[in-house]
Image (cartoon, grey):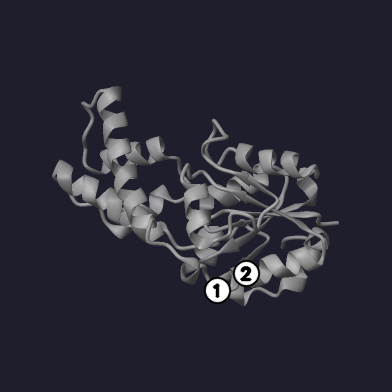
Amino acid sequence: MIKACIFDLDGVIVDTARFHYIAWKRLANMLGFEFTEHDNERLKGVSRMDSLEILLSVGNITNLTHEKKLEYADMKNKWYVEYISTLTPADILPGAIEILEFLKSHNIKTAIGSASKNAMSILQGLKLEHAFDTIVDGTRIAKAKPDPQVFLTGAYDLKVSPGQCVVFEDAEAGIEAAIRGGMKCIGIGSPVQLGKADIVVPSLDKLNFDIVLSLDSITKQ
């Protein structure tokens, strides 16, 4: 029986991906090369420092010290924090409030499982900081997705077994993390990229919420 649902934040509850992209593109342009939306797809669900490494590989930049990399990552994050400071409840993605209310009415626990170290700031802007039973973000984990640590920590906080959890994810790395953690997963986005998920829908408002309750009995074909 499903007892908990763990939600990625960016791209599932709110679309902050555009702010990440603008900040990474700004850094790439400062370093003298272009960073496209196609390049940015590789950064979904990936930690900040790993994202920086991918960006630097796009620009063929290989001679930076660790200290300089930390400086650039911090610079990008400061820009990103400036952008997300404009978030309000109007930015919550369609279907997010409804699924949270549905789960609460069925006594299913909820958690945020995000690699973002800015998750609490984002949730505060959305007025959702008290909407989840626990919040696991980049300040609490050492291993980034596709490692399942963020989701397993959420399950531990909620005192439920991984097999009783459903993960909501929009990134391939996140889907892989859910699978490695022994959890069911619902992909939010394209079936082409998220085909390993048990169910894939384009957005939360297109999901039949009742399916979540019976997901433990669904065998993926």
Residue drawn at the location 39% of the way across and 56% of the way down = 84
Decide which of 154, 81 is in the foreground and name it: 81
Q: Position of residue 203 (x, y in %)?
A: 56, 71
Residue at the image position 66 percent from the left and 54 percent from the top: 132
Tell me whether the residue at label 1 lies in contact with that at label 2, contact meaning CB atoms closer than 8 angstroms. no
Residue 187 lies left or right of residue 66; in this view the side is right
Instruction: Determine whether, in the image, residue 155 is placed left or right of residue 190.
Output: right
- Residue 97 shows which numbered tag? 2
Residue with the mark numbered 1: 94
Q: Residue at x 59, y 61 (%)?
A: 187
Dot 1, how many residues are within 10 Å of its Cα: few (below 14), some (14-19), or many (20+)? some
Nearest the viewer among 134 and 32 is: 134
Visible residue check, residue 178: yes
Which quadrant does the C terminus fall into? bottom right
**Residue 162 sits in quarter:** top right
Q: Where's residue 27, x and y in %?
A: 23, 45
**Between 43 and 11, the one nearer to me in the picture:** 11
Marker disc for residue 43: none
- Residue 103 lies, with reference to residue 167, above or below; the image says below
Residue 29 appears left or right of 19: left
Image quadrant occupied by the N terminus: bottom right
Across and down, in percent, residue 54 comes to 34, 41
Looking at this view, name the residue that lies furthest to the left: 32
